Amino acid sequence: MNNALYIIATPIGNLGDITLRAIEALKNVEYIFCEDCRVSSKLIKHLSIEKKLISCNAHTEKHKINNILKFLTEGKSVAYISDAGTPGLSDPGNLIVNKIAEQGFKIIPIPGVSSLSCLISVCGFNLSSGFFFCGFFPRKQGKFKKLIETNEILFGFESPYRIKKTLEFLAENCPEAEICLGRELTKLYEEVLRAKAKDFVNMQIKEKGEFVLGICK
């Protein structure tokens, strides 16, 4: 492998979604940094890769960058993976990329799945004029309302603890908006629901798992 930092996307649920290129990179890099060793070890074991994982999450990112820089300076190849999906997309990774780029080292993206792109592919919204990605939707209702009033097509993540409140807020503030909701995408209990915001109030939504929402007014 080249002396470089490889930013590798991993499956968000179904392990079969790993790409051939990602497998090759994970097998051949000399060091793998990951968000949580307990989570990533399941994927590494599934791929029959015998390699020690090094934890690097949002709390340790600043410190572990020095380790990554040391390995790269020595001419080694290093990979970074988050728990699921694409690093840097509401996951750790941005700080690592910025600091490594500042030092002039090569950074190679190995693309793959994300819950955002999964939902976009099945929402059916006309995105020819673009859309706005919110990350996690704002907790403050005033800020959320301003986003809705822009009339942009919105996509964002939501937690199982707030999904009911978010759907109620949308039903009250933009009842005719088209909503596409994805829960546990690519996993065993995957759900994709489409309806007007006002109709979600009467739906039985399991408040469990990971959610991604699309909002089209």
Image (cartoon, grey):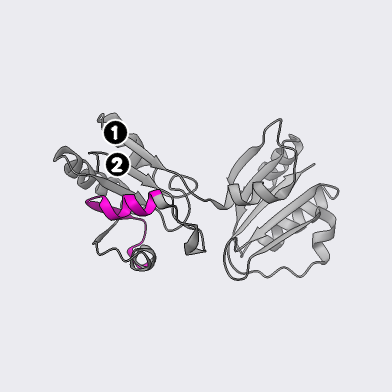
Question: Residue 7, how many percent across, how many down?
Answer: 37, 44
Image position of 69 (left or right of 162): left
Q: Mark 1 and mark 2: span between their CA atoms?
A: 6 Å
Are the residues tagged 1 and 2 within 8 Å (C-beta)? yes
Report the residue at 26% width, 29% height from top. Answer: 104
Query: Of the residues under marks 1 and 2, which one precedes in the sequence?
Result: 2
Question: In the picture, which quadrant includes the N terminus?
Answer: top left
The quarter holding residue 55 reads bottom left
Question: Residue 11, how many percent across, how many down?
Answer: 48, 58
Question: In the picture, which quadrant includes the C terminus?
Answer: top right
Q: Element under label 1? A: loop
In the rendered image, which residue does mark 1 sit on?
106
Question: Residue 145, how many percent across, how many down?
Answer: 73, 43
In magenta stretch: residue 211 = no
Residue type pointed to by label 2: Leu
- For label 2, the crowd category at 10 Å Cα-Cα, with few meaning under 14, some 14 to 19 and many 20 or more, is many
Question: Residue 125, how many percent across, how many down?
Answer: 75, 43
Report the residue at 35% width, 35% height from top. Answer: 98
Q: In this view, does 64 lie above or below 69?
A: below
Q: Element under label 2? A: strand
Whether residue 139 is visible here, answered yes or no, is no
Q: Is residue 154 above or below residue 196?
A: above
In the rendered image, which residue does mark 2 sit on?
5
In magenta stretch: residue 35 = yes
Report the residue at 24% width, 39% height from top. Answer: 2
Specify the segment rendered in magenta: 21-38
Residue type pointed to by label 1: Lys
